[in-house]
Image (cartoon, rainbow, N blue to C red):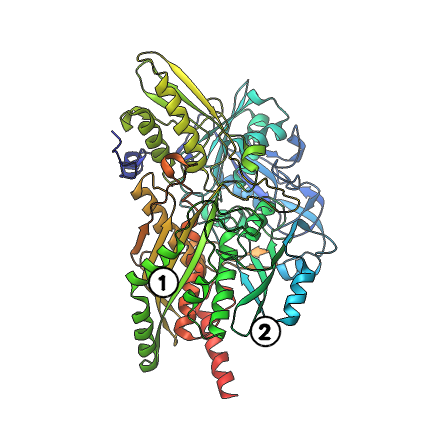
């Protein structure tokens, strides 16, 4: 049974299968007469295809390319600019041009190596800087501008005591999900079935309908158990699904496409590199008078989800602060590099790294404590958002900050670290904080106008209840949390709630598993469905209940003017991190990590704590460890060792606290929890390193190389 307090943890639905190793992932699946696929990928960044010469293909091996696509040769998403198979022009190194299929992988790899393609190579754009210089000519995927007029901003700046301008940069981040991408296409006389590791079944299905030019009932998509996603399995699987579906239709046999780690890291989507320019006017007392922000995102070769990532980056560009006279504009730009896409946080981690750093630097210039300085500008319940929406619900940030300062003994620790640093020539200690939020759900009216979520509950004659939604469990615990919501609503044993693998033949479109919406939006629909089913419960009789999304009454969102309520609710966080820096090697050691979070009410506290531990580890590593580079359009890190995500040796146990602040629009008071924990890690660890070294940094990750370079420059400046 579910305990009276829904936050009380239960055994996860998929616990036994995962712990025993019996849960079958897509790479574990074997089907009779199954063939494998290997993609031939462009070796150049930008050019026209003149000719293709294949080696002789043995019997049972075939080439699958654009000529075999019955429908549109693009992946159906926001823009129609991403070819399924690039057959005339190639736009980045690694772009798939065609696929060879056959029974043996080693032979396929050998055949692909023997392919000869003649290209007419053209100049490529490899960096965000190049794209910014050429943005007025071509390659703008999206643009938004909003806020106070620039004339007003310029007038304020002219009268200000000081105008502080800083440029801040963030790099790639790799998802490093445990399970690389994989997809299986199965041919049947009346349908094409695609199974695989994915977050968004109906994104995949819609892409298949477009590519195969078929009817809705001729395509079926099933989510296999998924070993991690973090956004990396939101948009990318749609292209792989098209590859295997087209191939299966041609050869009339099952076709499996699996990536090894090197291929996965080289060609799948990444977190967008970004560049921010902040101009802030202050008066003689250090009060902020105005702020002007310019944001650039590197979208890579295709638009993908860059337009909506840009939206969220802009919406978070003022952080958790009420800034007078705020103006922002932003661009998502094209480069001839691997496309960038969804990543946990969806543009927010880049923005919070920038705004937290910028305000931290201003406080340092003013010789003020950064936390105390930032507290002067915290938004409060009832305040307007930067898009003239409204923060309608209670905001507990002040309490969270105060509690955390006391828990960490912040003031005494700052003094102790200052004394330690004066006495120790090699090691320096520092403490840094970050304050952040995350808007839950799709931006603006996306849920109402585009997603239109539907959920279904089916009751069997044995009085068991099946959850029928299109949302994926990829390790975040959706199987468990959604089952708990339904069990509590029906007052049934948790074990009597069944949650089969989502299958588009059987489940309605409840929307994608993204944007911190699954528990809050889909969970609320299931709570309502459970209430309806309970009211009409007939024991021993099969029953079905369907619920549709209902949009909350908010300030209408206008995407053209970027105004209105961007989100129905916000989750909030405060991070505090202590570090020790070795100035001889530049290495950073994490000593203590604190996190405070308001995610409404936790549906399962252990699952939420797991999300916090994993998210904070990802965010902290983004700030000082994970370095991915592209050289002349080619990703340089092809192994996990090359890239360097954190291990258990790099972090310490995280001391986290949840604040109970129920949200009426979420199931049993829950808000979004999945993305928030990542967001504050990078700015907090950067602030801690800056506190230790008394050096400002203007980019992440703050690697040992960057630390040594900055220390050398500081020593040189001191001698000058």
The answer to whether one can see residue 651 in this image is no
- On the image, the x and y values in percent for residue 639 come to 45, 54
Residue 411: which quarter of the image? bottom left
Picture quarter with the N terminus? top left
Labels 1, 2: front one? 2
Q: Earlier in the sequence, mark 1 or mark 2?
A: 2
Identify residue for label 1: 577
Helix, strand, or loop for circle 1? strand
Towards the viewer: 188 or 132: 132
**Res 295 → quadrant:** bottom right
Residue lying at 58% horizontally and 30% vertically, measured from the top left: 206
Q: Is residue 51 left or right of residue 670?
A: right
The image quarter in which residue 408 lies: bottom left
Q: Quote the CA–CA distance across marks 1 and 2.
A: 31 Å
Q: Is residue 159 above or below residue 69?
A: below
Q: Nearer the viewer, residue 69 or 133?
A: 133
As helix, strand or loop, the secondary structure at mark 2 comes to strand
Circle number at residue 56: none
Residue beneath label 2, please?
162
Callout 1 environment at 10 Å: few (<14), some (14 to 19), or many (20+)? many
- Tell me if residue 77 can be seen: yes
561 and 344: which one is in front? 561
Compared across the picture, whether 129 is left or right of 525 comes to right
Residue located at (39% from left, 29% from top): 527
Q: Residue furthest top?
A: 541
Q: Residue furthest front?
A: 382
Q: Residue at x 26, y 26 (%)?
A: 493
- Residue at position x 30%, y 43% from top? 605
Percent x, y of residue 364: 47, 73
């Amino acid at each position: 049974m579910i305990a009276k307090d829904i936050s009380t943890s239960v055994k996860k639905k998929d616990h036994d299968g995962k712990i025993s190793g019996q849960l079958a992932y897509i790479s574990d699946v074997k089907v009779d007469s199954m063939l494998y696929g290997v993609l031939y990928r462009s070796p150049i960044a930008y050019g026209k295809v003149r000719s293709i010469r294949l080696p002789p293909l043995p019997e049972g091996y075939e080439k699958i390319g654009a000529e075999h696509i019955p429908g549109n040769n693009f992946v159906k998403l926001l823009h129609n600019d991403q070819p399924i198979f690039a057959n005339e022009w190639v736009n980045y190194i690694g772009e798939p041009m065609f696929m060879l299929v056959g029974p043996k992988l080693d032979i396929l790899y050998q055949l692909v190596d023997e392919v000869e393609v003649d290209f007419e190579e053209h100049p490529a754009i490899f960096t965000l800087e190049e794209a910014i210089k050429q943005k007025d000519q071509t390659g703008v995927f999206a643009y938004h501008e909003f806020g106070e007029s620039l004339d007003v901003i310029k007038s304020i700046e002219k009268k200000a005591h000081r105008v502080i301008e800083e440029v801040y940069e963030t790099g790639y981040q790799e998802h490093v999900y445990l399970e690389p991408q994989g997809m299986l296409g199965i041919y049947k006389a009346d349908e094409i079935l695609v199974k695989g590791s994915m977050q968004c079944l109906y994104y995949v299905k819609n892409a298949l309908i477009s590519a195969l030019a078929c009817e809705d009932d001729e395509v079926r998509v099933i989510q296999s158990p998924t070993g991690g996603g973090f956004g990396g399995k939101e948009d990318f699987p749609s292209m792989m699904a098209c590859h295997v579906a087209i191939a299966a239709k041609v050869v009339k046999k099952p076709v499996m496409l699996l990536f090894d780690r090197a291929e996965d890291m080289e060609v799948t989507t990444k977190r967008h590199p970004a560049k921010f320019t902040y101009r802030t006017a202050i008066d003689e007392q250090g009060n902020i008078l105005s702020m002007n922000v310019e944001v650039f995102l590197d979208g890579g070769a295709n638009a993908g989800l860059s337009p909506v990532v840009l939206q969220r980056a802009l919406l978070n560009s003022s952080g958790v602060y009420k800034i007078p006279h705020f103006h922002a504009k932003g661009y998502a730009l094209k480069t001839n590099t691997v496309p960038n896409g969804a990543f946990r946080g969806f543009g927010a981690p880049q923005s919070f790294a920038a705004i937290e750093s910028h305000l931290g630097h201003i406080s340092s210039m003013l010789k003020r404590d950064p936390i105390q300085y930032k507290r002067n500008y915290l938004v409060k319940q009832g305040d307007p958002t930067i898009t003239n929406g409204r923060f309608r619900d209670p905001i507990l940030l002040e309490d969270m900050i105060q509690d955390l300062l006391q828990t960490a003994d912040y003031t005494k620790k700052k003094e102790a670290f200052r004394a330690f640093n004066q006495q120790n020539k090699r090691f320096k200690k520092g403490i840094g904080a970050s304050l952040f939020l995350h808007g839950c759900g799709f931006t603006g009216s996306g849920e109402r106008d585009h997603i239109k979520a539907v959920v279904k509950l089916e009751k069997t004659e044995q009085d068991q209840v099946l959850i029928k939604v299109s949302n994926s469990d990829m390790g975040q615990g959706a199987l468990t949390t959604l089952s708990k919501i339904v069990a509590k609503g029906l007052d049934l044993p948790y074990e009597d709630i069944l949650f089969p693998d989502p299958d588009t033949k059987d489940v309605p479109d409840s929307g994608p598993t993204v944007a911190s919406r699954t528990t809050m939006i889909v969970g609320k629909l299931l709570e309502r469905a459970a209430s309806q089913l309970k009211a009409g419960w007939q024991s021993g009789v099969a029953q079905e209940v369907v619920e549709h999304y209902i949009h909350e009454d908010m300030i209408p969102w206008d995407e053209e003017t970027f105004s209105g309520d961007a989100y129905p609710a916000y989750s909030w966080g405060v991070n505090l991190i202590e570090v020790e820096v070795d100035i001889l090697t530049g290495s950073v050691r994490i000593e203590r990590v604190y996190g405070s979070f308001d995610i409404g009410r936790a549906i399962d506290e252990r699952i939420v704590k797991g999300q916090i531990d994993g998210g904070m580890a990802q965010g902290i590593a983004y700030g000082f460890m994970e370095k991915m580079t592209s050289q002349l359009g080619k990703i340089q890190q092809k192994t996990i060792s090359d890239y360097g995500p954190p291990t258990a040796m790099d972090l310490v146990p995280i001391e986290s606290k949840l604040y109970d602040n129920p949200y009426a629009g979420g199931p049993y008071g829950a808000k979004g929890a999945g993305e928030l924990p990542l967001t504050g890690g990078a700015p907090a660890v950067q602030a801690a390193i800056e506190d230790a070294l008394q050096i400002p940094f203007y980019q992440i990750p703050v690697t040992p190389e960057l630390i040594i370079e900055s220390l050398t420059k500081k020593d040189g400046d001191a001698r000058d």
